[in-house]
Image (spheres, helix red, strand yellow):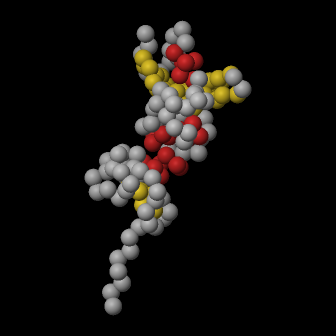
Amino acid sequence: MTPEPSTAPKVRGSCLNGCGETLTLTEPGEIQCSAGNCPGPGGVAALLANPSPDHFVEFGPDWWQISHPLRELATGPTALNPHRCTLAGFVNALPSLPDPGVYKVILTGDLWTWGTPIEPVPGDEAGREIVPDSGAAA
C-alpha cells in the first residue's frame, strides 16, 4: 500500500498578501501561504519572528514611515484603535526631519525617546510592509 500524501495543517487566518485563507503549518513549524502565486508566502512567519516591542521610524530626505509593533497592529488599524498611537502626530509636529535613517523609538509614559539611527533589526523587513501611518514633509 502506498501512503497517502500528507497535507499541511491549515491555520486560521488570511495571507498578508490577500491570497485568502491559504495559511498552512509547515513541517518545521512555520506558517506559510499555500497559494502557488503568493508573492510572499513566508510573510506571516517573518512578521511573527520579529520580537521587537518597539516602534521604528524611517526617515528619508522628505518623507517618513512608522513600523508599529505587533501589539498595536493586533488591535486593528491604528486609525480605528481607540488607543491610537500618538507617534505619527509627534512626527508630524517636528520642526524638521532628522537625518535619513531608521530610528528605534520607545514610549515611556507620555514621552517618546529616540535612539540614534540604526539598521533595521533582523526580521523587521516584514513588519515594515505594514505601515498604517506615514507622511511627507510639508
Q: Residue at x 45, y 36 (%)?
A: 130
> From this viewpoint, is residue 66 visible?
no
Question: Depth check: 60 or 65 in front?
Answer: 65
**Could you say where residue 104 lies in the image, as x and y percent from the top left?**
58, 30
Question: Depth check: 97 or 1 in front?
Answer: 1
Q: Residue at x 51, y 10 (%)?
A: 96
Which residue in the rendered view is the most extreme toward the left?
A: 37
Image quadrant for the C terminus?
Answer: top left
Depicted 8 relative to depicted 96: above or below: below
Q: Quadrant of residue 82?
A: top right
Left or right relative to 82: residue 124: left
**Could you say where residue 99 lies in the image, as x and y percent from the top left?**
50, 18
**Could you say where residue 127 lies in the image, as x and y percent from the top left?**
48, 40
**Could you say where residue 109 lies in the image, as x and y percent from the top left?**
72, 26
Depicted 52 relative to depicted 101: above or below: below
Question: Depth check: 103 or 31 in front?
Answer: 31
Q: Quadrant of residue 126?
A: top left
Q: Quadrant of residue 135?
A: top left
Q: Residue at x 50, y 28 (%)?
A: 79
Left or right relative to 55: residue 44: left
Image quadrant for the N terminus?
Answer: bottom left
Q: Residue at x 53, y 22 (%)?
A: 88
> From this viewpoint, is residue 129 visible?
yes
Depicted 116 relative to depicted 19: above or below: above
